[in-house]
Image (tube, coloured by chain):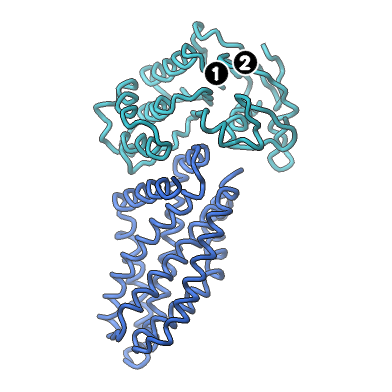
Amino acid sequence: MTRLFGASPALVRVDLSIRRGEAVVLRGPNGAGKSTLLRVVATALSSTYGGGSVLGFDLATEREEIRRRCELLTHRTRLYEELTARENLELFVRLLGLPAARVDDALERVALADAAGERVRAFSAGMRQKVAVARALVRDPELLLLDEPTTGLDDAARTVVERLVLDAAAAGHTVMIATHHPVAPELGARVVTMRDGAVEAAG
Amino acid sequence: MLVGQASVIARKDLVIEVRGRHALGTLLPFAATVLIAFGFAFGPGRDVLDRVAPGLLWMAVLFSAVIASRRAYQVETEDGALEGLLLAPIDKAAVFLGKAAAVTLELLALVLAVLVLVVLLFDLSVQDPLLMVAAFVLGVVGLAAVGSLFGVVAESARTREAIFPMLVLPLVAPVLIAGVRATDLAAAGRSSEVLSWLGLLAAFDVVFLSVGVLVFGYLLED
């Protein structure tokens, strides 16, 4: 697939296959196309030319099916500042018709149970990212996409994100991570290198 | 499903507005300032103020609707939350309907406060309050529908603060005209003549709510 922003190519004839249950780390310099690729796979963006399938669903025509099974975590946490951590999770639980009990469980797992009733406005970057991780836990997605999820986080918050990734992989879910940081060796991830919008080495 | 998801979105928007005190802290002072400024501009003559009171009222509501609709999308873009709604496997029309419902309720609360102001400042007497309420409910629904639909269009523009009013204000001219006429006639007790204007407002609501439900998902996509 190819993705243009105006006349500038962000992805150039990317041809990549990832098996279900596989963990893949995207490496490459800034501007290599890692984030764009993740956003296209997550259906946040569409490809300009070409296409593909995610979990067996077509990227162009079956976007909602993909969205049902996929979660994209980025440094932007997509939280509402005036809502509490719990309310941010409950919003998606209600919208998606998920069991309400998952909220408490997810908040416990990211060690935010005590701060669940506080507004996100007062949270540090690390705490916000923990809430975003908790939202991913609530959904339990088949495909977990992470775009520089640990940038600017302290060790404790980074550990929470890494735990999410390892648990997802252990549960047989597919994981794609774009990061400059080292990933846990036990993830057994395949490294895909990108440069100038193209896949340079697919591992 | 659609109504349930829309009510979740509307509740979320209202909670955020109440906690942020935006409606009370910004819209009401703004609307009151507009009314008082117009009052000074037209001078103390009661005849003139009586004649223009319905128009002033609707101008205040219209400008407040623009601000409230913009605000409804600002909270979505502060931390990329709108993308979260896009990527959630929900009917995207629910986002439109939820936002329109929340803006409608905010504006109706504002109308109530502004009506009290207008009655006090301009001595507006209302012969048929029920029809006036109907005019405001129908008019505000139309303003909220257009604002919620074009709010997402403006969000993708770099100069969104300028583009949004330019998109919305010409489109809501029928609401302004019909609303002012219906309010004027209801105040004068000419109830039989109000109904045709209410019909126009209702038709406007149906058109823009339908268009919003049908196209909002496409507008939200990349």
Of A123 and B92, nearer the camera is B92
Identify residue type, mark 1. Answer: Thr
- Say which mark, if any, is on residue A19: 2
Q: What chain letter is assigned to the residue under label 1? A: A
Q: How far, Cα to Cα, is label 2 from label 1?
A: 8 Å
SS at circle 2: loop
Label at residue A174 = 1
Q: Position of residue B198 (x, y in %)?
A: 44, 77
Identify the residue shown where x is 30% and y is 22%: A108
Q: Residue furthest front?
A: B1
Q: Nearer the viewer, residue B212 or A33?
A: B212
Chain holding disc 2: A
Residue type at the position of mark 2? Arg
**Which mark is on residue B193?**
none
Is residue B16 toward the left or the right of residue A193 in the image?
left
| Rendering quarter of residue B46 | bottom left
- Residue B62, horizontal then vertical, whole percent: 44, 70
Position of the C terminus of chain B, as image quadrant, is top right
Q: Which chain is cyan?
A: A
- In the displayed structure, would residue A187 be above or below residue A94? above
Question: Is label 1 in a helix, a strand or a loop?
Answer: strand
Q: Are marks 2 and 1 in contact (CB under 8 Å)?
A: yes
Residue A175 higher or lower than A125, as above or below: above
Q: Are marks 2 and 1 on the same chain?
A: yes
Chain B, colour shown? blue
In the rendering, at what x and y percent does residue A20 appear? 59, 16
